[in-house]
Image (cartoon, helix red, strand yellow):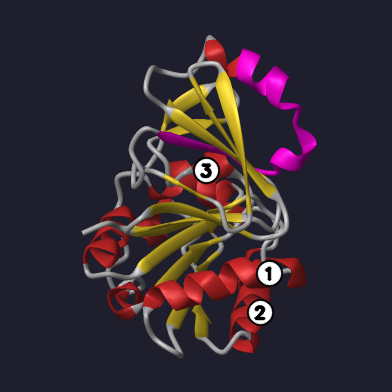
Amino acid sequence: MTWKIGVMGGDEFQPGCADADRALIRATGTTKPKVIIVPTAAAYQSPSKAASNGVAYFKKLGADASSLMVLEDTDADDVTLLRPMDSADLIFLTGGDPKHLLSAINGTVFSLRLRAALERGAVVAGSSAGAMVLGGWMVHQGISKAVGLVENVAVLPHHERSQPSRVAKDLADNIPPRVKVFGIDAMTACIRGRSGWKVVGPGKVTTYTAGSWQVYRSGDQFPG
């Protein structure tokens, strides 16, 4: 089974994200999916606000949305707190601090529950920091191993601010062989299904491999 995963370039829960998030909802295969918003990356910012914004936003899109306040590694190992993950159709990780998010969830019960959700056919998605940790590698103040739900992929969010030629040069000496990097613009998503990755949203996705790059726009697909 191909795991259904969505990675977004940032600025989540804005009107411009609606096409991408409706695509995530369709990927669940249910008309009123149970959506869980996880604001771990915003733990030292405004996690309650991040969670409530996400819940209100997905409710407007027709989902049954709620928050899961996993803020620290102790929360990520709390099996009682994590119980709603067992029946979620879509688990969405917000943006914020990728370093904190990775340290809080990596190697925890939470990360195991993410994999279990994917195995049973649920969708796991993340925006900005939330997207960065889902790959096999994370590029942030260097490069490090990430949660690894998508092996050999790294995500660069807010890529609308970047120059591809400069990014390709910077990556050439730092990224391990065979790793594909997704540079994703804000409010734009890559969503993986049976036929590979599909771009949805108003921006672009630039993929980098071995010093070269390819640009994709909404509706385009590429293997992976």
Camera-nearest residue between 199 and 95: 199
Image coordinates of residue 12 in percent, x first then y, are 67, 62
Residue 33, image quadrant: bottom left
Specify the amino acid type for callout 2.
Tyr
Query: Which of the two discs, 3 and 2, labels the residue nearer the N terminus?
Result: 2
Image coordinates of residue 50 in percent, x first then y, are 66, 67
Specify the amino acid type for callout 1.
Phe
* Mark 3 burial class by Cα count in 10 Å: few <14, some 14-19, many 20+: many
* Mark 1 burial class by Cα count in 10 Å: few <14, some 14-19, many 20+: some
Q: Is 20 part of what is drawn in magenta?
A: no
Q: Quadrant of the N terminus?
A: bottom left
Label 2, secondary structure: give it: helix
Check the image and report above or below for 92 versus 152: below
Residue 79, image quadrant: bottom left
Q: Residue 13 carries which label?
A: 1
Q: Do the residues labelled 1 and 2 touch (CB within 8 Å)?
A: yes
Query: Which of the two discs, 1 and 3, labels the residue nearer the N terminus?
Result: 1
Q: Are marks 3 and 2 in contact (CB under 8 Å)?
A: no
Which residue: 22% across, 70% down? 120
Q: How far apart are marks 1 and 3 (CA)?
A: 17 Å
- The residue beneath circle 2 is 57
Residue 36 visible to an observer of this rendering:
no
Check the image and report above or below for 62 versus 161: below
Which residue: 38% across, 67% down? 123
Camera-nearest residue between 103 and 57: 57
- The residue beneath circle 3 is 132
What are the residue bounds of the magenta stretch? 153-169
Residue 112 visible to an observer of this rendering:
yes
